[in-house]
Amino acid sequence: MVSRVTRLYGRMCHMQGTPHGGHEAVRQFSLRPRRDAVARRDEAFGALFEAQFDRVYAFVRFRTADEAAAEDIAAEVFARAWSKLRDPADGDAATAWLFTTARRLVVDHYRRPSTETVGSMAESAHPSSLSPEDAALSSERLGVLARCMAGLTDREREIIGLRFVARLRNREIGSLVRTSEGNVAKILHRALRKLRERLTAEGYAASNGLEE
Amino acid sequence: MTNVNSSTLDAALDAAIESALRGDRVAKAEVDESELGAVRFVANAVPDLLPAPATRERALRAVRERAAVRSEPRAWWRLGPIMLPAPRFRAVPVAVVLLIGVLVGSAYAIPVLLPQVFGLNDPSAVEILQSGRAQELHLTQTAAGITITADRAYADPHRIVVQFTVQNPPDDPGQPSNFGRRIRSPLTTGGSVTLTDSAGHIYRHVRGVESPLISGASYNGEPLVGVYSFDASPVPADAERVSFQLTIAELRGVAGSAGATHVPGPWTFTFAVHVSR
């Protein structure tokens, strides 16, 4: 009981930003194994955040076309991971857990009233590090992408997002969306053909980076 | 349906997507030209979706805040103010509290059990104690290795009743064993029970009985239960509550029994009792 109190108190201090508060609390009770376990989990979670946050954020932004919602949902995914993910160091399982949770939260986001559509993706703010020219190009590219993606089915949009933005392999996508790896490949083929047709219709050809 | 050709195409598209995402050149030979163009366009757009450093920092702060807030209800059982857990686990502490309440309540609901002989000797005292009108005391005193507990007391304008228990009468090495079982001396307070109040009044002992014998004795180490009644005439007429001092001066073996012991006390209990009218 005391050891669990210590561990949770340590976690809370750590999460609340108390400088070394958690570790001090643990040291007082001389529970080295617990302290090591807490420290290992902290490190693993930090590494998971560093490795996966950008992918989760980008995937959610791709799906919601809303930068604020993407930030909020991605933070929520990791907050839930902190309390529910058993082993943040288990790379594949942790990645699958993150994107499963992200997909669910995106669905919840769409169920809420006054949700923006995919067409507003280009209106989102851009990283301040971009030059005005790059920002304009980025905005244009996202705008075209959003318009072209609007012609795809939701399943096709999701699989494009999981493959290109989340960078999951077809086998992992199949597990997430509960279909076979071969079916994921078929959907990708179909979606990319549709996308190309729409890009051509938009006037995007060799001069706009479609061709090498 | 997936055949060899489609598998090859899938693998080629997969490789092309990986190359495009890495920013490498993509060979056109095995991939449909239209698909390859779309692959390049989407791959080029992906960096535009990535968060700015400030976004990442804000999100990390939000993660910390949310995790800290959510970890508090999980520690509902820790020391300090009690916080209920999440709703789906809320039934657990409630059930525990109810269970404790039932157990404690049922313990107090059990009637006071006294040997039948008490009813013969002092029926009104037994009625008072068993009706639950007496005030629970549970005061304990230990002297000479013997613990005596003042269990409950009752006062009204006519009488005062006190019940006590001698928990561990002393061993008596002078007694023989009976089929391997140690026999102990009969033990009694020998009438050494006195009751006074805070004003110095001494209450007259009108009736007393101790188990298991009417004469007041305990064999074989059973707890000795005593019920004493006192004349309440010294209690002031308008007193609502009186402070008493119960003293058991000594314990001794029954006169004439072999190996009789004498254990000097005293065991003293101070308590206040509401006067029932």
Image: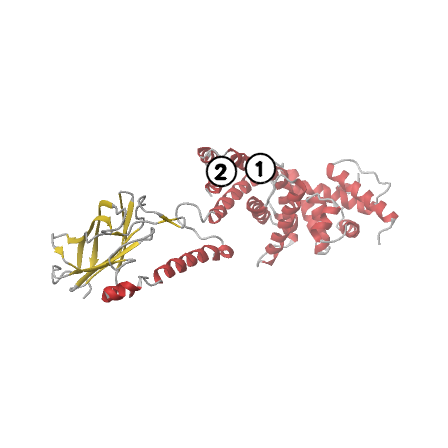
Alpha carbons under labels 2 and 1: distance apart: 12 Å
- Asked whether, in this view, residue B227 is left or right of residue A71, the answer is left
Residue under the point 57% across and 41% down: B55
Question: Which image quadrant for residue B121?
Answer: bottom left
Find residue B4 and report its horizontal and vertical position in percent. Answer: 88, 48
Q: Position of residue B8 (x, y in %)?
A: 85, 45
Side of A44 where B104 appears, left or right: left
Give me the disc on residue A46: 1
Number of numbered discs on residues? 2
Q: Nearer the viewer, residue B106 or A38?
A: B106
Residue B219 in percent (x, y) is at 32, 53
Chain letter, disc 1 residue: A
Q: Which mark is residue A14?
A: 2
Left or right of A141: which side holds B237?
left
Label 1 element class: helix
Q: Quadrant of the C terminus of chain A?
A: top right
Residue drawn where x is 44% and y is 33% of the image: A28
Q: Is residue A144 visible?
A: no
- Up-down: is B265 above or below A36? below
- Residue A183: x and y in percent read 78, 52
Q: Which residue type carries mark 2?
A: His
Which color scheme does this rendered protein use? Answer: secondary structure
Q: Secondary structure at mark 2?
A: helix
Q: Which callout, 2 or 1, points at the residue further toward the start of the chain?
A: 2
Packing grade of label 1 (10 A; few <14, some 14-19, many >=20) is some
Kind of residue sitting beneath label 1: Gly
B248 vs B275, nearest the viewer = B248
